Image: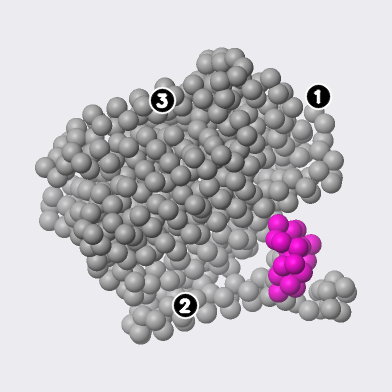
Amino acid sequence: MTVEMPSDEKVDARKKMLRGGVFMSLSPFASLLLGLVVSWQIQLYISTDQYGLFVWYDVLTSFLITLVPFRIHNAIGRYMAYSIGKEDEESVVNLRKSLTVSTLILVPLTGLIAFFITPIVLTVSGRGSEYLLIDGLVFTFGVMSINLSAFPSVAASAYREFRNLGVGNLLANVASQVVVMVLIPLNWGIRALLMKSIILGLVTALFLYSTVKNIWSLKGSLYPLKPLIKFAYPPIIAFLFAYVLNEVLIRAIFQYYDTLGYGGELGLYGFAVRIVTFVNAFTLGYYGTLGSYYTVALGKSTKDLDDIFQWTVRMSFFIFTPIIVVCLVMAPSAFLIVFPRYYWAYQYFGILIIQMFFYLFLRPLHAILSASANTQYILASSILASILSGFLMFIFMEFGLMFVVLGYISNPIFSALFSVIFVKRSVPDLNLRVGRIMHFSTIAFSALLPAVAVHFLRINPILELAANVSIFIVIYIGATRILKLVTEPEIRKATVFLPARFVDPVTKFLILLFIRRGELNPQISSD
């Protein structure tokens, strides 16, 4: 029997989630600022061919930190959040021991596999002659460090310690980026980029260990492995399909084009992915808080889940769609000004940034499937989407690399479509029709038409940048006001996470921007 969460508890949960989202976004924001400096250094000291080698190390990192731990830490994190929602302290204690034992076994295992598999993969990919033992060792310790930090991170998320998790990620990101910024001018090359993982993982793990109580413990009994595997293996298989049919495939296609004389295209694509990662980090800070809150809400009642789903999706489209479009309209001039050596990467960047739009809906859907313990549906949607997008990439090879990237970004589109079907099966009472999200999206993307026109005028890049951003602001704010897409209560809810002294001025500013004066609450209009 489920008990609906009281109204005041819902409000408190939303406030905590928003505050957590803010802290989780601190690290991506710092990463964006410092990462842009690092990216600028890359274009000065690292050639596109060298960066193409780093792309393969990057693929291997993602592969090893996901596959080798068998996603056990994610499964434990989900069980912890669910057990905390049920106030089952005995299960929480047992899960902490399972987390500790998994850390002691799987982190060294990851290092061994990374050390021996790296030269083999680089040889198969055509980069074997560039492999250096010292780079392999740095890469190995980086993979181990990231895996080490993953285990306490999922526990902190389950406890909803988003403040400590956010601050830890912030400190780790700043420390790792500063190290890279120092080493690149010293001609460390891609080894400097590989050093980031070592610093990032170690600082995160040490900070969480010192700030979150009992995050690692050998007390209690080992939680049965079988139910953990049940929740872990579907994401593993889904990841394998996604990487074999998508990430590895698209890089292999780019590598093939490089052998045909398209020099540096893999490096350009990898650089575009790097910049997209910074932008994507803004959304991950917000979505990183969803899983545990969805799980707790579902533990209470379907109505609680429906309320929080509607609110979070509407908020994400209102906040992140403008960011996506601004990145698109800025890309040509911004790359020309900041990254002239990697200028043509902006074309790949423009296509890749569009896929983020579909993630705005896909990530909440996957969070619901995880919360409802139906990760097999995530597996099914990921496999089907990967097969279809991989098929499109093969077909589009005939038309050039730009079309290959278009085939690649179809993955979240297919995945979202299948996920909608599976969510309706898992939580049939959940309402997936979220109001006004298409209005926000249509208004934002309409700004692309004047941006294209301005770009082909071939004016000064700085003037082009300023013109496109100004046009977007006028279109988005003006249309939102005219169509009355934002209400005063929604703005007030969106600002509750701010420090008390900032709530009132920020609220008034947003109301002034997005709501016409005649529609204001009398209390606001009289201020």
**The residue under label 2 is which amino acid type?**
Asn
Judge from the rendering whether residue 41 lies leftward or rightward of residue 72; answer left or right.
left
- Disc marking residue 1: 1
Which numbered disc, 2 or 3, marks the residue closer to the eye? 3
Q: Dot 2, how many residues are within 10 Å of its Cα: few (below 14), some (14-19), or many (20+)?
A: many
Residue denoted by label 2: 468
Q: Where is residue 164 in the image (x, y as percent from the top left)?
A: 60, 46
Identify the residue at horizontal 56%, vertical 16% (top origin): 222
Q: Are marks 2 and 3 in contact (CB under 8 Å)?
A: no
Q: In which quarter of the image is the C terminus?
A: bottom right
User: From the viewer's perspective, is the residue at label 3 or at label 1 nearer?
Assistant: 3
Q: What element carries label 2?
A: helix
Q: Earlier in the sequence, mark 2 or mark 3?
A: 3
Left or right: residue 13 versus residue 414 is right
The kind of residue tagged 1 is Met
Horizontal side of residue 50 vs 422, given as left or right = left
The alpha-carbon separation of the residues under discs 3 and 1 comes to: 38 Å
The reply to whether the magenta stretch includes residue 503 is yes
Q: Splitting the image into 4 quarters, where does residue 331 fall?
A: bottom left
Q: Give the range drawn in magenta.
A: 487-509
Query: Can you see residue 239?
Result: no
Compare residues 13 and 184 and report the one nearer the observer.
Answer: 184
